[in-house]
Image (spheres, rainbow, N blue to C red):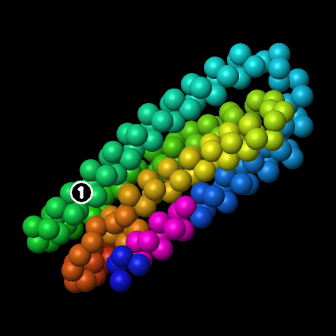
Amino acid sequence: MESKKSWGGLVLILAISLVAGVANVLFFLYVMNPLNEAAKEDEVAISTYAINLFVGWVFFSAWFLARADDELKKVEEAVHKKDKALFLLEAPKQIALSIRILYIIICVLTVLSFHLFRLGSILTTAEIQFGIGFLVIATALFLWDLDEPVGGAIGAKGIPEEWIKELRAHQKAAK
């Protein structure tokens, strides 16, 4: 059952990412590219800006993904060792809301930075705009899922049901 839930979650993440990639291409073609008719004279500045944002996004993503993966491993270790106290300590940990908001802003700026280019070829447009939209959304969705070690598609497996109930009770009491 858990396997089907995991695959369903992963398929959903990929489907949302595909839709985001296509939507990004369409938004670029019909909204942004017509606005970029004079972009040729700014192409060095645009290129520098887009590259710097993309590199920053890559570093932020790598750091966030590594951190979320470390937390997932701690939860999996607690389950494997049958250590409920460690599980209850590690399972609720998530990336702070302020960091999530910062990451969303970086994601949006990264995608939009690629909208500043003037692209003439439909093939180049489709490849770049689909790729950046798909990649950024897929990465963000995988990060959010990894950061949810209980119940996510990539979450820890084999958690005793009574541990999950106790965790939910602790979370309700904390609110």
Which SS type dominates the magenta stretch? helix
Camera-side residue: 61 or 164?
61
Query: Would you identify the image quadrant in which residue 129 lies?
Result: top right
Residue 84 visible? The answer is: yes
- Percent coordinates x, y for residue 27 in the rendering: 79, 48
- Percent coordinates x, y for residue 70 in the rendering: 27, 50
- Percent coordinates x, y for residue 73 in the rendering: 23, 57
* Circle 1: element type: helix
**Rendered residue at 71%/16% (across/down):** 44
Residue 173 visible? The answer is: no
Camera-side residue: 146 or 121?
121
Camera-side residue: 132 or 127?
127
Quick one: quadrant of the C terminus?
bottom left
Dot 1 surroundings within 10 Å: few (below 14), some, or many (20 or more)?
A: some
Quick one: quadrant of the N terminus?
bottom left
Residue 175 vs residue 52: left or right?
left
**Rendered residue at 58%/43% (across/down):** 107
**Rendered residue at 38%/57% (across/down):** 147
Compared with 18, 25 (above or below) is above
Q: Which residues are magenta?
A: 5-14
Residue 100 vs residue 53: left or right?
left
Residue 133 vs residue 159: left or right?
right
Report the residue marked by disc 1.
Answer: 73
Residue 115 on the magenta segment: no
Question: Amino acid under label 1?
Answer: Lys
Exactly how many numbered labels are in the figure?
1
**Rendered residue at 71%/54% (across/down):** 22
Compared with 173, 95 (above or below) is above
Query: Would you identify the image quadrant in which residue 87 lies?
Result: bottom left
- Percent coordinates x, y for residue 10 in the rendering: 47, 66
Q: Which residue of the protein is positioned furthest toward the front in this rendering?
A: 123
